[in-house]
């Protein structure tokens, strides 16, 4: 494990253990999720340990090859704060973290800061992600810092507008950079370590050559992490790097192929996704057409959905047939698989 990754893990431990008042209930719930997963039972603990909540499926960009633009019918829904609050109120004693993003641009939901604030006040760490093309007033920036948001990820894949917009179609790099600078400025003003700022650089054939200049630029600005990830499947990018630079180059040094778990998927005992339209998914691979496993519009209880017959049947199917299931057979998912490349800061 390299230094940067250890530092990142230490920071996340600080978020969870020192800031978030870990409770016995949360630890027990996590333990039982692990227990059921490891004993390959179709049951799970009372609640998932992490929630993914989609503030909206609206987006102001049209990123090239974005799975959600290509394959997922856009419902153009915005999650209301009242519904979000009900979900947090029900689950707050059991979950460690809310990932406040999925498809779409979270900062298009005008209640996003209230959402962050509410979860953080209830001792749940919030990690959100943005394309950075939002318009915030100074007051909103102040409110964002005051919300004590744990972590914010900016998706920026290019160091110049010309390369950036090849992937982030309709995006404006200058606006993104100004927003990052503003957050850093207000963090300093409030002497706050949070939100931790990560730049996520999605590697494509077009932008690989700007990776190092982007890394340098953002590190000089004062971000916390620079995290390159593959925009496509890891194998596709590895092939590209190998063809272009040979297989003995520094870009390949830390790169490993993801390990596929045969007829198992740990996400099914760990994480649950709530879309802005309040349907429930088992993982983020919506564009693989994974099944909808619940509907909060009429079920209204996360605990019931998490151990519903439908959810348990899906776990059962994955345990038996993952390798041949249409939705799962092409999935490269393994724990943190995309983080194992090019991680030096
Ligand atoms: S910002 Fe995200 S959701 Fe929007 S187009 Fe880009 S990848 Fe897709
Ligand atoms: S698509 Fe992948 S992450 Fe989702 S349930 Fe199937 S194996 Fe798990």
Image (cartoon, rainbow, N blue to C red):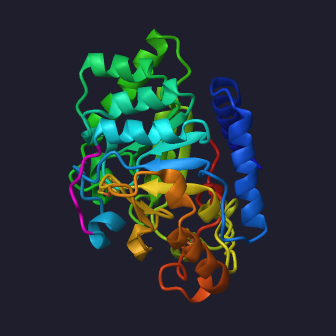
Left or right of 298 in this view: 73: left
Magenta segment includes 141:
no
Residue nearer the viewer, 32 or 108: 32
Residue at 25% in and 47% down: 78
Task: Indicate whether 264 appears above or below 297.
Answer: below
Q: Classify residue 129 by image quadrant.
A: top left
Residue 79 point in image, percent of width and height? 29, 45
Q: Classify residue 239 by image quadrant.
A: bottom right
Q: Is residue 310 visible?
A: yes
Residue at 41% in and 16% down: 186
Classified by dominant secondary structure, the portion drawn in magenta counts as: loop
Q: How many marks?
A: 0
Left or right of 293 in this view: 309: right
Q: Quadrant of ligand 2?
A: bottom right
Residue at 45% in and 63% down: 281
Residue at 35% in and 29% down: 113
Residue nearer the viewer, 251 or 123: 123
Q: Classify residue 20 by image quadrant.
A: top right
Residue 55 point in image, percent of width and height? 34, 45
Residue 165 point in image, percent of width and height? 27, 53
Residue nearer the viewer, 240 or 329: 329
Q: Is residue 152 visible?
A: no
Q: Which residues fall within the magenta stretch? A: 73-79
Magenta segment includes 77:
yes
| Quadrant showing the C terminus | top right
Task: Indicate whether 77 appears above or below 152.
Answer: below
Residue 189 point in image, percent of width and height? 44, 10
């Amino acid at each position: 494990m390299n230094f940067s990754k250890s530092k990142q893990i230490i920071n996340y431990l600080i978020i969870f253990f020192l800031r978030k008042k870990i409770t016995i209930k949360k630890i027990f719930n996590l333990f039982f999720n692990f227990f059921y997963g490891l004993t390959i039972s179709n049951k799970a603990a009372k609640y998932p340990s992490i929630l993914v909540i989609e503030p909206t499926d609206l987006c102001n960009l049209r990123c090239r090859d974005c799975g959600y633009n290509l394959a997922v019918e856009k419902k153009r829904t915005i999650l209301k704060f009242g519904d979000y609050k009900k979900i947090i109120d029900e689950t707050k004693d059991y979950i460690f973290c809310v990932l406040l993003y999925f498809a779409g641009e979270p900062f298009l939901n005008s209640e996003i800061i209230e959402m962050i604030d509410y979860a953080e006040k209830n001792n749940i760490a919030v990690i959100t992600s943005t394309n950075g093309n939002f318009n915030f007033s100074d007051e909103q920036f102040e409110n964002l810092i005051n919300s004590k948001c744990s972590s914010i990820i900016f998706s920026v894949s290019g160091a110049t507008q010309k390369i950036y917009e090849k992937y982030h179609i309709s995006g404006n790099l200058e606006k993104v950079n100004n927003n990052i600078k503003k957050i850093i400025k207000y963090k300093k003003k409030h002497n706050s370590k949070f939100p931790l700022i990560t730049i996520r650089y999605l590697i494509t054939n077009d932008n690989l050559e700007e990776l190092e200049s982007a890394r340098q630029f953002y590190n000089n600005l004062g971000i916390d992490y620079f995290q390159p990830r593959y925009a496509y499947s890891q194998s596709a990018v590895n092939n590209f790097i190998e063809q272009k630079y040979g297989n003995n180059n520094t870009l390949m040094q830390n790169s490993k192929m993801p390990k596929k778990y045969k007829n198992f998927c740990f996400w099914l005992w760990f994480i649950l996704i709530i879309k802005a339209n309040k349907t429930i998914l088992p993982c983020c691979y919506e564009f693989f057409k994974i099944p909808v496993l619940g509907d909060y519009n009429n079920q209204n209880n996360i605990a019931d959905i998490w151990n519903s017959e439908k959810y348990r049947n899906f776990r059962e199917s994955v345990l038996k047939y993952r390798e041949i299931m249409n939705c799962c057979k092409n999935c490269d998912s393994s724990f943190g698989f995309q983080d194992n490349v090019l991680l030096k800061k």
